Image (spheres, rainbow, N blue to C red):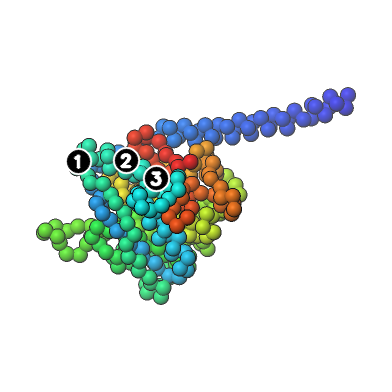
Amino acid sequence: MASFYASKAALPTLFLALCLLQMASATRRLAELVQNQSPPMLYHNGPLLSGKISVNLIWYGGFKPSQRTIVSDFVASLSSDSSVSQAPPSVSQWWKTVDKYYHLSSSKKQTPSLTLSLGRQVLDEGYSLGKSLNSKHLVELASRGEQRNAVNIVLTASDVVVEGFCMSRCGSHGSAVVPGKVNGRRSKFAYIWVGNSETQCPGQCAWPFHQPLYGPQSPPLVAPNGDVGIDGMVINLAGLLAGTATNPFSNGYYQGEAGASLEAASACTGIYANGAYPGYAGNLLVDEATGASYNAHGVNGRKYLVPALYDPSTSSCSTMV
């Protein structure tokens, strides 16, 4: 009799466990369904970033030399030069998904390929514009780099407050007019801004290396370079570089409406490896020595976490692992 009552009491618990299992399975299926049914990345007939482009880094505020090296090594890792040693899966292999956009656009108009290289690094450790910046300040800072055949990246330190940072964005990319004219025409240069969220909003801008502020909760992963803020910046920089290359002037490749569009990386937000679903980054590689999670190797023995990119040839999010 006691056995009967025990079994009967366990039925609700068993039923609840089965329901939770079905819900988890449905969540994963839904995530896969969303990826597989993603709308196409449409080309809006504008120019892509092309040719030999220097990536200039403008450091605003206090950054340690070791932090600057993590980011500069990432930029150097984008090169597919065979003389640059990277174990697979590599950052340069990840960037090859971006190359596919060039193959598609060249069938519509002549678009040369893109070659990125690390350019100049500018330091502003004295906070020349203060510690509270707006969008105009970002353009002013970006203008300190070369403005022809270049992308200028503004990186703000953890104690710098930027308009919209942590509320609606972790970084952004845009374009500005180059002073003067070339062959009687004005031109634009592309720029990117990324903030260090370590002390302001790591749960929003450095996930999965910090507990998420909202949504499903899971333990934070160990950052591959031992710096939650900088490793988070690399994730955001990687995605914005992909968006800048394929949609530098807001008339390249994007999904949705202009001004509220999804680009090569933002169309795959939160996905870093196969098996990803809301709150879970996916089945990442793990460094046996440090326990750090990553999905791509870089130069100088670096390991990085890079976001999934929308593959225009398959209309789905492509991951490295």
Which residue is label 1 attached to?
109
Q: Is residue 29 left or right of residue 85?
A: right
Q: Residues within 10 Å of mark 1 (few under 14, many from 20)?
A: few
Q: Is residue 104 left or right of residue 216?
A: left
Instruction: Name, please, the residue furthest toward the left.
Output: 184
Q: Residues within 10 Å of mark 2 (few under 14, many from 20)?
A: some
Q: Amino acid at mark 1?
A: Lys
Cα separation, mark 3 vs mark 1, equals 25 Å
Which residue is label 2 attached to?
100
Q: Secondary structure at mark 3?
A: helix
Residue 65 in sight here: yes
Q: Does the residue at mark 2 contact the one at mark 3 (Cβ under 8 Å)?
A: no
**Picture quadrant of residue 195:** bottom left
Query: Residue 165 location in percent, x, y?
Result: 44, 59
Which residue is label 3 attached to?
93
Name the residue located 34 percent from the left edge and 59 percent from the top edge.
118
The mark lying in front, picked from 3 and 1, is: 3
| Front one among 89 and 214 | 89
Q: Which mark is residue 76?
A: none
Q: Does the residue at mark 3 contact the one at mark 1 (Cβ under 8 Å)?
A: no
Q: Secondary structure at mark 1?
A: loop
Q: Earlier in the sequence, mark 2 or mark 3?
A: 3
Q: Earlier in the sequence, mark 1 or mark 2?
A: 2
Instruction: Name, please, the residue furthest toward the right.
Output: 1
Residue 240 in sight here: no
Image quarter hosting the N terminus: top right
Name the residue located 11 percent from the left edge and 59 percent from the top edge.
184
